[in-house]
């Protein structure tokens, strides 16, 4: 079966018929892809595709299946989310500093791994063959956006035909190697990997009980601090961009559900209308807690934890990611070595991290 080329179906016209229910059935492991598709259903992009292997309708009797959200026109931002049903079969180990191993599919039979290996490789080839030409034609007619000032080193841009796959399970990434290694991978012939996280990010899962409140009210901040009535305002976009190494378009930040925190004693600079926020957080397009930041002089007061819960509460109640309720899982990706941020995730209620992921820029060079 692993030698049979994978056939893909586009589910844009009827995602709720098969694809969304299949992903919901495998929560929380499917949360990133499910939330990205749900967000796109609420705010559709003409350049986005929801793909799944044709055996999705016959699963689980017909073995592992694979699905993806693809929008190459997202350019410097994440262009592809991938999920394999094999991810739900991995032992649900909980990890900590004493048990920091990289997540793989080693507990799954070689036969099922071989199917998933063929599927992920066929998917990357499908994207390159069927979707990349239109994006390349568009890309060469447009002028790349200018670089923005940041206090952090911003990730370098990539150009087509390379594309960025985000929050990819390290087990899937390892299946693309020819030496069965993740940290010292020799990637298969025909695949050029421009970059990937050798030291991966780790995934935290947040059950809705962590951020939903019985009264429906927000998570109260310490005295002297308040949430903004609105999310991020246009005049504060550059401030937010200057505090992150992740390249994002201003319009993306303004589109994502967000919560900002103000300090009553902060009157802002003279050329600004009103105060500047001292903390902010977003719920990413894939339902992840993203771009969480507290200015240094306001740290140590528990603001990050309360803000995170409020971002998730408001974001999941917005209707952008499907209906709120027992399936309203959210998630976060944190660099394995970033112990301070990992402690925040644990204080929020994420406990131990669940599996490891990577962002990778890949190119098909057949």
Image (tube, rainbow, N blue to C red):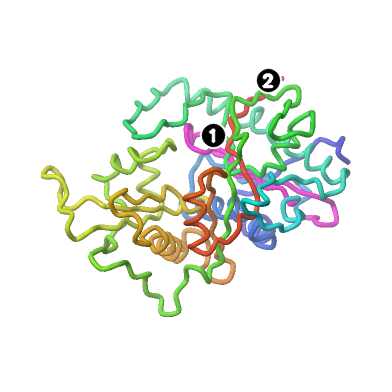
Q: Earlier in the sequence, mark 2 or mark 1?
A: 1
Which residue ends up furthest to the front in the rendered image?
98
Q: Residue 55, how many percent across, how many down?
A: 79, 49
Which residue ends up furthest to the bottom in the rendered image?
215
Q: Residue 186, how many percent across, how many down?
A: 73, 25
Q: In which quarter of the image is residue 96?
A: bottom right
Q: Name the residue under label 2.
A: 365
Q: Nearer the viewer, residue 105 or 43?
A: 105
Q: Residue 341, how many percent across, how many down?
A: 48, 50
Q: Nearer the viewer, residue 274 or 62?
A: 274
**Residues shaded magenta:** 57-85
In the rendered image, residue 334 lying in the magenta stretch gets the answer no
In the rendered image, residue 79 lying in the magenta stretch gets the answer yes
Res. 200 mark = none
Picture residue at 42% right of the left edge, 36% below the top: 245
Res. 72 mark = 1
- Classify residue 88 as left or right of residue 318: right
Up the image or down, 43 lies above or below 79; here it is: below
The quarter of the picture where the C terminus appears is top right
């Amino acid at each position: 079966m692993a030698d049979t080329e994978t056939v893909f179906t586009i589910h844009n016209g009827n995602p709720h018929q098969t694809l969304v229910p299949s992903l919901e059935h495998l929560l929380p492991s499917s949360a990133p892809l499910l939330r990205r598709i749900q967000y796109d259903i609420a705010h559709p992009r003409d350049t986005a595709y929801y793909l799944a292997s044709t055996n999705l309708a016959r699963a689980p009797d017909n073995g592992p299946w694979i699905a993806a959200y693809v929008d190459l026109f997202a350019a410097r931002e994440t262009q592809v989310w991938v999920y394999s049903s094999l991810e739900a079969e991995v032992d649900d180990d909980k990890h900590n500093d004493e048990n920091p191993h990289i997540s793989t599919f080693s507990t799954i039979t070689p036969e099922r791994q071989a199917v998933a290996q063929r599927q992920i490789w066929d998917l990357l080839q499908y994207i390159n063959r069927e979707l990349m030409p239109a994006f390349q034609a568009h890309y060469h007619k447009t002028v790349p956006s200018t670089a923005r000032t940041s206090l952090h080193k911003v990730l370098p841009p990539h150009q087509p035909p390379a594309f960025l796959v985000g929050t990819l399970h390290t087990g899937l990434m390892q299946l693309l190697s020819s030496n069965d290694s993740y940290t010292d991978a020799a990637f298969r012939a025909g695949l050029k990997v421009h970059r990937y996280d050798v030291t991966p990010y780790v995934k935290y899962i947040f059950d809705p009980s962590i951020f939903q409140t019985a009264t429906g009210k927000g998570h109260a901040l310490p005295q002297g601090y308040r949430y903004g009535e609105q999310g991020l305002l246009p005049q504060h976009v550059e401030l937010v961009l200057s505090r992150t190494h992740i390249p994002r378009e201003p319009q993306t930040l303004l589109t994502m559900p967000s919560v900002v925190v103000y300090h009553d004693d902060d009157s802002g600079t003279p050329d600004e209308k009103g105060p500047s926020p001292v903390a902010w957080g977003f719920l990413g397009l894939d339902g992840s807690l993203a771009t969480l930041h507290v200015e240094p002089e306001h740290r140590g007061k528990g603001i990050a934890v309360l803000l995170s819960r409020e971002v998730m509460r408001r974001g999941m109640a917005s209707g952008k990611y499907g209906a709120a309720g027992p399936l309203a899982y959210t998630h976060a990706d944190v660099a394995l070595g970033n112990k301070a941020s990992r402690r925040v995730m644990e204080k929020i209620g994420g406990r131990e991290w669940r599996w490891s992921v990577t962002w990778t820029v890949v190119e098909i060079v057949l």
